[in-house]
Image: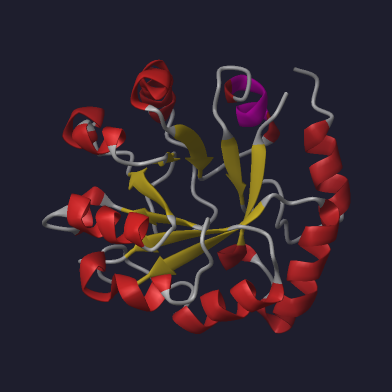
Amino acid sequence: MNFELNASMMCANYGNLKKEVRELEAAGIDSFHIDIMDGRFVPNYAMSLNDLKYIASATEKPLDVHLMIEHPNTNIQLFLNQLRKGDTVYIHPEAEYHPSTTLQKVIAAGMIPGIAINPGTSIETVMEMLRIVDKVLVMSVNPGNAGQMYLPYVGQKIDRLLKLKEEMGFQLYWDGACGASKILEFAPKGVDGFVLGTTLLFKDQDRLSYKETIQNIRKLDF
């Protein structure tokens, strides 16, 4: 069964980011997920433009840039300038007056356009954008902090999006509180990838190596 595993780099060890990138690459991670937060759209600050620039220079793996910022259209070019063609940029539709304008800038730059859907955002409010984007990132927790609890009603939203996926032509990704049980349940249904954070990949105590963790995920009994 094919599905992507994406490393949530806001959970990585910033004391040696170069080592983290190299170990994750060697472990077989598919892409690096970079959360940018401005302290306004979400109540936290996360990775910076310089973090993004460094990781882009340190790996040839794809980058998934998740912009949790107000009015991304204002500064979108700053982020696009650090990326390579084929990298992904997610925006939150609620954060922009005209999100389709921002998405068009992403497309024009040769990047993959995506939207991130918060737990409290209904599918109906983003329906037209599902026809524009190539990727949809479903937040299974409220955005802004790692280590939060899974919100069970999000599973029903994912089931509904899976029914629209083929018609609308997008890929579907899971972000937040992603453990092995969620991959076992939703990968067979058609979720295309999972963002791995503190629940599974970046554990503080007694964690397996990145390679062991990713190998164990690949060997799950579906």
Q: Relative to residue 57, is residue 197 depicted above or below?
A: above
Q: Is residue 191 above or below residue 141?
A: above
- Is residue 65 left or right of 122 when viewed as pictured? right
> What span is in magenta?
181-185
Give left or right: position of 93 versus 98.
right
Residue 21, percent from left and from top: 74, 69
Residue at figure coordinates x 66%, y 67% from the top left: 12
The part of the image, by quadrant, that contains residue 222 is: top right
Q: Is residue 213 above or below residue 204?
A: above
Q: Nearer the viewer, residue 140 or 166?
A: 166
Closest to the observer, 5 or 141: 5
Coloring scheme of the render?
secondary structure
* Magenta segment, prevailing SS (helix, strand or loop): helix
Query: Is 130 in front, or is 138?
Result: 130
Give the answer, above or below, for where 27 lies relative to 156: below
Q: Give coordinates of residue 34: x percent, y percent.
A: 52, 64
Residue under the point 44% across and 39% down: 140
